Amino acid sequence: MTLPLSYRSSSIRLLRPCLLLAVALLLGGCEATLFTGLNATDQHRAITPRNDIVFDAGHGLALDVYAPAQASHAPIVVFFYGGTWVRGERAWYRFVGTALAAHGVITVIPDYRKYPQVTLDGFMQDAASAVAWAHAHATEIGGSPDDLFVMGHSAGGQIAALLATDPQWLAAHGMKPADLAGFIGLAGCYDFVPVPQDDAIMLGVFGSTPAQQRRGQPVSFVGGSEPPMLLLQGTDDDDVEPSNAISLYRATQAADGDSTLRTYPGVGHEALLFALSRPLRGGAPTLADVLAFIQSHPRAKPPAVTR
């Protein structure tokens, strides 16, 4: 499950001051400042952004699309950000969209409703609607509806994983998990029942009883028909225990599923995600592993060449 890493320990030592500053900003409630700084370094001329596209007018939800210039039949990733199901904004994660789009992957980043405005059913319905929008508009944005991936970090990893495992959410839009080309999880919450009684947010989001909580636990729904999975996890994660990724990996393997687990020694919860940004890219091979997974799981055939 643990594979050799392509980065050096010296690279981590050089990046550690930057990572410590990032963590300090997060703990100090300065997320907007931190993400503004990351996004300021990640601009690419060959990317066409389309912002503020409304995909659910009834709930006032919009998404942003980052596409390579002149994209045609490109793979699409719908990325769900984390934030403990209570905070976050799609604009903060422009660095994710530009990082992937710079390598030929169209990236869709939607907002979704959060707790306490909604609980599990609310934000999962929003997530499914965003994926359905990406599927319906794939050709329009330069992508292929057959090469549609879902991806998420932390709480967003739980959301994306549940779309890939529990059929009920996509079924509302005439889709099913097998329609997805793959799921990419970055330190997601996949196996958390029973929720600790002192975790007020998770109890509010998922319910007070194990039976209620299992509705939101992706590992509960693994049956072998899921799309291919890439699970990325830092071993120094103090927010989401690495056992979550290990459990989902083992469940899919037991069901003869297609799953890959990559663990990164010395990498923490936020560092795993921030390695997608240009200044912190040497902290973990997150981007390289994500791109390799997408490239190795194509479902769409390239368009026929006419002469």
Image (cartoon, grey):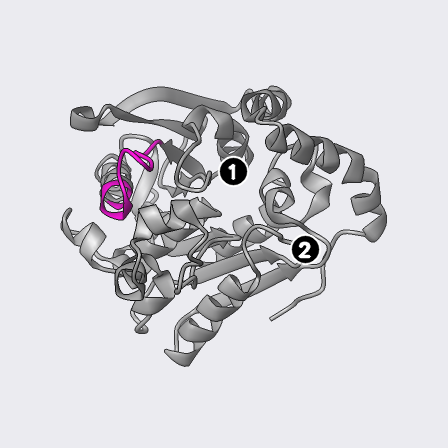
Image location (x, y in percent) of residue 69? 45, 26
Image location (x, y in percent) of residue 204? 33, 46
Q: Is 180 positioned to the left or the right of 294 in the image?
A: left
Q: Is residue 117 magenta?
A: yes
Q: Main secondary structure of the magenta part?
A: loop
Name the residue located 73 percent from the left edge and 42 percent from the top edge. Answer: 282
Q: Is residue 43 above or below residue 128?
A: above
Where disc 2 sits, the SS reads loop
Q: Is residue 103 magenta?
A: no
Lower position in the chain sequence, tag 1 or tag 2: 1
Q: Which residue is mark 1?
A: 100
The residue type indicated by label 2 comes to Asp
Q: Is residue 107 above or below residue 183?
A: above
Which residues fall within the magenta stretch?
111-124
Q: Is 90 positioned to the left or the right of 213 in the image?
A: right
Residue 51's disc is none
Neighbour tally class for label 1: few under 14, some 14-19, many 20 plus, Cα within 10 Å:
many
Q: Which residue is mark 2?
A: 236
The residue type indicated by label 1 comes to Leu
Q: Quadrant of the C terminus?
A: top left
Image location (x, y in percent) of residue 66? 43, 29
In this rendering, the label closer to the viewer, 1 or 2: 2
Where disc 1 sits, the SS reads helix
Q: Is residue 306 visible?
A: no
Name the residue located 32 percent from the left edge and 30 percent from the top edge. Answer: 141
Neighbour tally class for label 2: few under 14, some 14-19, many 20 plus, Cα within 10 Å:
some
